[in-house]
Image: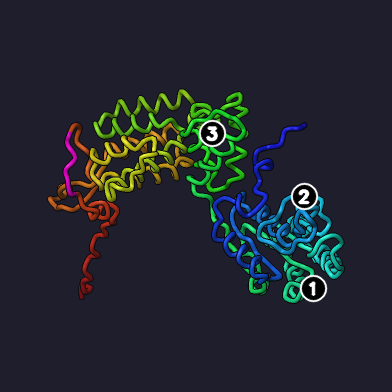
């Protein structure tokens, strides 16, 4: 038997196994139980959050006849009747999935609507699922308006899109809309742990956290990355292998950078940067991870209870929260984000990365106005003295003043000489 990828093998088959979309499941379950069925549904959300999966489950719920063949519409499809098994395998004649990206014209829409008037062949309802519906042309949207508003009693439309803003409001107003949320990292980690446990795959908790972070809220992406990690590390999922596969930055590099920054040790900071360059690590990824770590440090300073014990870096976050002033952390966070956006403009990524680190090392809001030429004073960013301790209670006004442009006064107008 050929291997089936995890994303397909572990695709949810009913509402109870659909992860992370409880608000949609609750609404659809109540509607099915009370037989209050709308004729058109619109599922929106980013890739891999369950739009197509939810469409198939809903189609099974509408057409399920139960193991004995005498069942009615249900919120709990049996999974064994002809309708359920054929929808799962993509062979049910009355469940039609159409890709709007490749069938976007008015002719394709007219053909679909012509077929919709005929009664179902094998099921209770004909269910038309139009994926990426925002790709339809305006003429195609206009052609479907009347049927979408008053379809035959045996027809249900399910529309899915990643970009609902491109759908005409006349179509939106005819649909029952559900926005599918991105999966929280905790949900993804729990699901991956369950899947790998069932598959008998050895895994490390930190590796699963890295995969969840890289998936950016998409369960399908998380499972695809897990498949890749299993192949990469020869049948297991280890943190080291996942970091190597994703090009992720080892947390120890970030800790060393912040330790050097706290000690104002420029040589140590450049040494860490050189070590990262020797391993060809992504400097953009390093600045992103550094900003993420600084965000956690800022949270620990403002709300100490927000530090979660399951964070691998929880102890380091608390240590740095005590080592840096809150204003310093805010400044470092801003510099890290700006440095990341400026990498493309730098002579090379190494130069851009090291200049970002040197900027953190050299500048911070000054404790008092620094003198300028001519004996005038004004708030500005002052270079940090080597070995000087960070003064407490710095104000944001210094930073704002540093970016202000001083415009000299215009010379007074004098009357012309007679």
Counting the numbered discs, the total is 3
The location of residue 261, given as percent across then percent down, is 28, 34
Q: Secondary structure at mark 2?
A: helix
| Residue that protrudes farthest toward the left in the picture | 375
- In the picture, the disc for residue 246 is 3
Which quarter of the rendered picture does the C terminus lie within? bottom left
Q: Which residue is mark 1?
A: 152
Q: CA distance from mark 3 to mark 2?
A: 37 Å
Q: Nearer the viewer, residue 231 or 95?
A: 95
- Say which residue appears at 46% left-offset and 23% top-offset: 278
Q: Residue at x 22, y 52 (%)?
A: 398
Q: Is residue 128 visible?
A: no
Element under disc 3: helix
Mark closer to the observer (3, 2)? 2
Q: Residues within 10 Å of mark 2 (few under 14, many from 20)?
A: some
Query: The magenta stretch spans which residues?
Result: 388-393
Give the numbered dot on residue 85: 2
Q: What quarter of the picture does the N terminus occupy?
A: top right
Question: For numbered disc 1, what is the local secondary structure?
Answer: loop
Identify the coloring: rainbow
Q: Looking at the picture, how far across and down is residue 188, in whole percent? A: 53, 44
């Amino acid at each position: 038997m050929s291997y089936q990828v995890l994303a397909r093998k572990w695709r949810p088959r009913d509402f109870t196994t659909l992860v992370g979309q409880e608000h949609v499941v609750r609404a659809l379950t109540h509607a099915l139980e009370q037989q209050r069925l709308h004729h058109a549904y619109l599922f929106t959300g980013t890739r891999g959050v369950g739009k197509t999966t939810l469409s198939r489950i809903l189609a099974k719920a509408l057409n399920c006849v139960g193991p004995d063949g005498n069942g009615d519409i249900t919120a709990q499809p049996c999974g064994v009747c002809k309708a359920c098994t054929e929808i799962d395998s993509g062979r049910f004649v009355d469940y039609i999935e159409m890709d709007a990206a490749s069938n976007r014209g008015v002719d394709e829409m007219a053909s679909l609507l012509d077929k919709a008037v005929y009664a179902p062949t094998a099921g209770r309802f004909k269910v038309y699922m139009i994926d990426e519906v925002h790709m339809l042309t305006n003429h195609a949207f206009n052609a479907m308006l009347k049927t979408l508003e008053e379809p035959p009693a045996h027809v249900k439309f399910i529309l899915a899109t990643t970009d609902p803003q491109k759908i005409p409001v006349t179509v939106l107003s005819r649909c029952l809309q559900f926005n599918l949320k991105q999966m929280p990292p905790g949900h993804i980690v729990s699901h991956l742990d369950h899947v790998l446990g069932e598959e008998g795959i050895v895994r490390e908790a930190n590796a699963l956290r890295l995969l969840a972070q890289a998936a950016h809220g998409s369960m399908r992406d998380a499972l695809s990355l897990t498949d890749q990690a299993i192949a990469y590390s020869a049948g297991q999922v280890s943190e080291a292998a996942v970091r190597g596969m994703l090009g992720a930055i080892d947390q120890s590099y970030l800790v060393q950078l912040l330790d050097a920054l706290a000690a104002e040790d420029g040589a140590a900071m450049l040494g860490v940067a050189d070590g990262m360059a020797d391993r060809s690590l992504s400097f953009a990824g390093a600045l992103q991870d550094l900003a993420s770590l600084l965000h956690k440090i800022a949270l620990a300073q403002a709300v100490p209870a927000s530090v979660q014990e399951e964070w691998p870096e929880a102890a380091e976050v608390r240590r740095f929260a005590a080592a840096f002033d809150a204003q310093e952390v805010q400044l470092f966070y801003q510099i890290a984000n700006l440095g990341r956006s400026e990498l493309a403009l730098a002579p090379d990524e190494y130069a851009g990365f090291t200049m970002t680190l040197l900027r953190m090392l050299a500048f911070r809001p000054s404790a008092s106005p620094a003198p300028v030429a001519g004996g005038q004073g004004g708030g500005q960013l002052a270079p940090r003295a080597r070995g000087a301790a960070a003064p407490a209670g710095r104000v944001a006004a210094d930073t704002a003043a540093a970016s202000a442009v001083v415009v000299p006064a215009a010379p007074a107008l004098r009357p012309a000489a007679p």
